[in-house]
Image: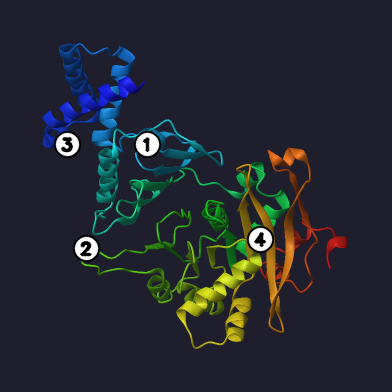
Amino acid sequence: MHGAKEIYRDLRGKIFDAIDPEVINRLNAQQLSEQLSQALSMLIDKEQLPVPAVLRNDFVRNLVDELQGLGPLQALMDDEDVTDIMINGHENVFIEKHGLVEPSSVSFVDAAQLLDIAKRIAGRVGRRVDESQPMCDARLADGSRVNIVIPPIAIDGTSISIRKFKKQAIDLSQLVEFGAMSTEMAQLMMIASRCRLNVLISGGTGSGKTTMLNALSQFISEKERIVTIEDAAELRLQQPHVVRLETRTAGIEHTGAVHQRDLVINALRMRPDRIIVGECRGGEAFEMLQAMNTGHDGSMSTLHANSPRDALARVEAMVMMATNNLPLEAIRRTIVSAVDIIIQISRLHDGSRKVMSITEVVGLEGDSVVLEEIFRFQPEISEENIRHVRGNFVTAGLMKRSVLVEKARFFGLESQLDSLFRMGSVQ
């Protein structure tokens, strides 16, 4: 196999030296494949190289992918089972399939090929990556998110991380089928979305926060005007009245950057019914809370946190980044007044994603925020759980003073809410 790689590297170099980029740009994939096949055959026969027909076809496909696609990455981009691609230098490629990370057989010819593909990815989306600007965060044409870090920042060689864009949006019923939540939890979330509750979705990296946000958005009325704000546009709302805003990084002259906080402030002037922020990570949290408190009920966002209480602490910290003249008590009152529901999601050790809890923000008692857990995932304690996490979704019911009960009554969904809980479980 090592011999085949050396042969390919040698043939690739000779063909790349001979090709005319302008001619390549005029050819479609089929025409390019035919011409490369002829050129490879001539070289192989001339040098009497031991390359069987199957390997020749692989060489041609690899060259086409590199000239018109993303080289060795193209096969991984085309594989729908691959959700994440992580490249740590030209010989170490890892992928995530079905929630589990595993090494890939894909590798690059050399560090120069990987760097060239990294620059091509950045160039296709109007970004630049070089020694003066060694980091790049961008969105590919298909919606996938990509992060690139090159030497000298990346010590062991160019690093590329790609979070692939799912072509098919997942809804709540599918999440129930996957075991991410119970039917009752899905119905509660549907009611919360329709009743215009303000929702925070909390979880770790890759836990499925954006997937959940997409699923919840499907229950927003088509009559509402929605403004979405994201670093990289991933949300796919089906409603007709949607304005999508995306941040912009600084250009070559380090000017022209547009941050999420700028977009949230601007969104408030666009007469939205709801504002959806793809991920709160800084000062925009303050404007987001202001929006939730000033008539933009039903707004939603995600953030990185390990529990509902941690999520509120992170919001506190982000608000303090935005303003230093508000006392902590005032910040907490603003948060409690704005946020109604926190959905906590986790990716577990077996690769599965689950909604660990649905928690209502009740109010303040002294300096402490009062949270009431409506649903939670309770794992089973067994040896089998080491390999596959099993458990049950349990509930203690709703409190009578729950904001969800009040909103459901206002929107005529009280009977649907009552059907989720037995009378004996209501506190």
- N-terminal of the pair, mark 1 or mark 3, is 3
Total marks shown come to 4
* Amino acid type of the residue tagged 4 in the rendering: Ile
Q: Measure how far apart labels 4 and 1 are at the Cα level.
A: 49 Å
- Give the numbered dot on residue 25: 3
Name which residue type carries label 3: Asn
SS class of the residue under badge 3? helix
Cα distance in 3D space between marks 1 and 2: 31 Å
At horizontal 69% and vertical 64% (from top left) the residue drawn is 359
| Local SS, label 2 | loop
Nearest to N terminus: mark 1 or mark 2: 1
Crowding near the residue tagged with mark 2, few <14, some 14–19, many ≥20 C-alpha atoms within 10 Å: few
- Using a 10 Å C-alpha cutoff, classify the residue at mark 3 as few (fewer than 14 neighbours), some (14 to 19) or many (20 or more): few
**Is residue 256 depicted above or below 376 in this figure?**
below
| Earlier sequence position, callout 4 versus callout 1 | 1
Q: Categorize mark 4 by other alpha carbons within 10 Å: few (<14), some (14-19), many (20+).
A: many
The first of marks 2 and 3 along the sequence is 3
